[in-house]
């Protein structure tokens, strides 16, 4: 049942993505309204799919690659909808929704088999740690999208080729503010995620930190975002350099999230873990 709802959800994300892209190309308000309606429907359907899988599995569905990618996309869309309700930056949907769709397609390509929990995963720290980390990843994804928008806008202004896209994107100041706020929310979440992961590791394996590849890259990711946030808060680092660093930091995060599991032997390889 959850697979059927999951497939419906992907279709709704496709419709929402099409609506947002049509809106940003044509500026037709009807397309934006339709896109929002489809996205809210997709978010609700997605939440139902996750709830059904949780009921069928008997545990929080954050164990396999399919489950973690799906939950990441859901958090991303939820964070965007919340931001849209607060700031009304609808053009961000043309960047966030396609990214969420790509993640959902990637999730759909993974095995959907429900796996029994290993002893190490039979812990209350599984939902706490995983949800906090994925929420942080989702916020950083919004910062990434805003940074891409910033670089596109800045290039148009610098080249004095103020084409159609210029009228469709928020100002550089608004985008920079959005990036800063996302970093300010995502970084504390990431910090708490790493701390809860360490507590979980001590309970499961008797050690808070073992310099496993996953743990090492998590720390690298933390330092990347710490440096970026420090520069913004202490020396007022803004503009193009900050946007580029935000994009690079998200690349490091994605490698930590996915690349380490796929490419580097790790104690965490049996599950998409968020240490």
Image (cartoon, grey):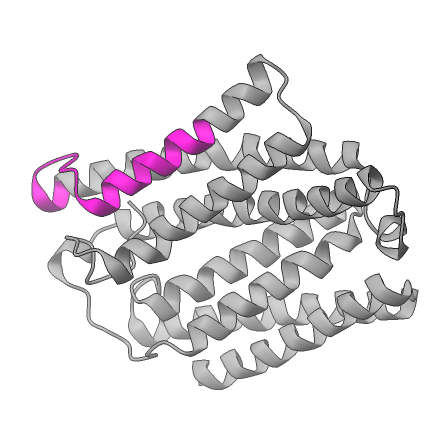
Q: Residue at x 88, y 47 (%)?
A: 161
Question: Is 88 left or right of 193, judged from the image as shown?
Answer: right
The N terminus sits in image quarter: bottom left
Q: Which residues are magenta?
A: 203-226
Q: Residue furthest front?
A: 159
Q: Position of residue 3 (x, y in %)?
A: 44, 83
Judge whether residue 208 is colored magenta.
yes
Q: Residue furthest top?
A: 234
Judge whether residue 194 is colored magenta.
no
Question: Is 22 left or right of 112, judged from the image as shown?
Answer: right
Give whichever of 52, 136 is nearer the camera. Answer: 136
Examine the rendered structure and indicate whether residue 260 appears above or below residue 34.
Answer: above
Q: Position of residue 208 (x, y in %)?
A: 16, 34
Q: Residue at x 38, y 62 (%)?
A: 68
Question: Is 204 left or right of 27, judged from the image as shown?
Answer: left
How would you classify the magenta stretch by its main secondary structure? helix
Q: Residue at x 23, y 73 (%)?
A: 115
Q: Is residue 7 visible?
A: yes
């Amino acid at each position: 049942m959850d697979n059927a709802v999951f497939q419906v959800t992907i279709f709704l994300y496709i419709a929402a993505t099409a609506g947002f892209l049509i809106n940003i190309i044509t500026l037709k308000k009807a397309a934006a309204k339709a896109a929002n309606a489809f996205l809210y429907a997709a978010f609700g359907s997605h939440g139902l799919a996750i709830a059904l899988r949780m009921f069928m599995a008997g545990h929080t569905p954050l164990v396999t690659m399919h489950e973690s990618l799906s939950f990441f996309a859901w958090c991303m869309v939820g964070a965007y909808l919340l931001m849209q309700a607060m700031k009304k930056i609808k053009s961000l949907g043309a960047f966030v929704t396609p990214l969420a769709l790509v993640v959902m397609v990637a999730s759909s390509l993974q095995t959907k088999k429900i796996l029994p929990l290993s002893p190490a995963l039979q812990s209350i720290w599984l939902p706490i740690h995983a949800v906090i980390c994925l929420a942080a990843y989702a916020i950083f994804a919004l910062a990434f999208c805003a940074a891409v928008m910033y670089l596109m806008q800045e290039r148009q202004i610098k080249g004095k080729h103020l084409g159609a896209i210029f009228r469709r994107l928020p100002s550089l100041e608004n985008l920079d503010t959005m990036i800063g706020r996302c970093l300010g929310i995502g970084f504390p979440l990431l910090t708490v995620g790493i701390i809860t992961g360490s507590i979980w590791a001590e309970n499961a394996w008797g050690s808070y930190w073992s310099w496993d590849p996953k743990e090492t890259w998590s720390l690298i990711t933390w330092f990347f975002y710490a440096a970026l946030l420090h520069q913004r808060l202490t020396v007022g680092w803004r503009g193009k350099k900050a946007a580029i660093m935000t994009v690079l930091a998200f690349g490091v995060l994605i490698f930590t999230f996915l690349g380490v599991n796929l490419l580097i032997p790790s104690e965490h390889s049996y599950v998409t873990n968020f240490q």
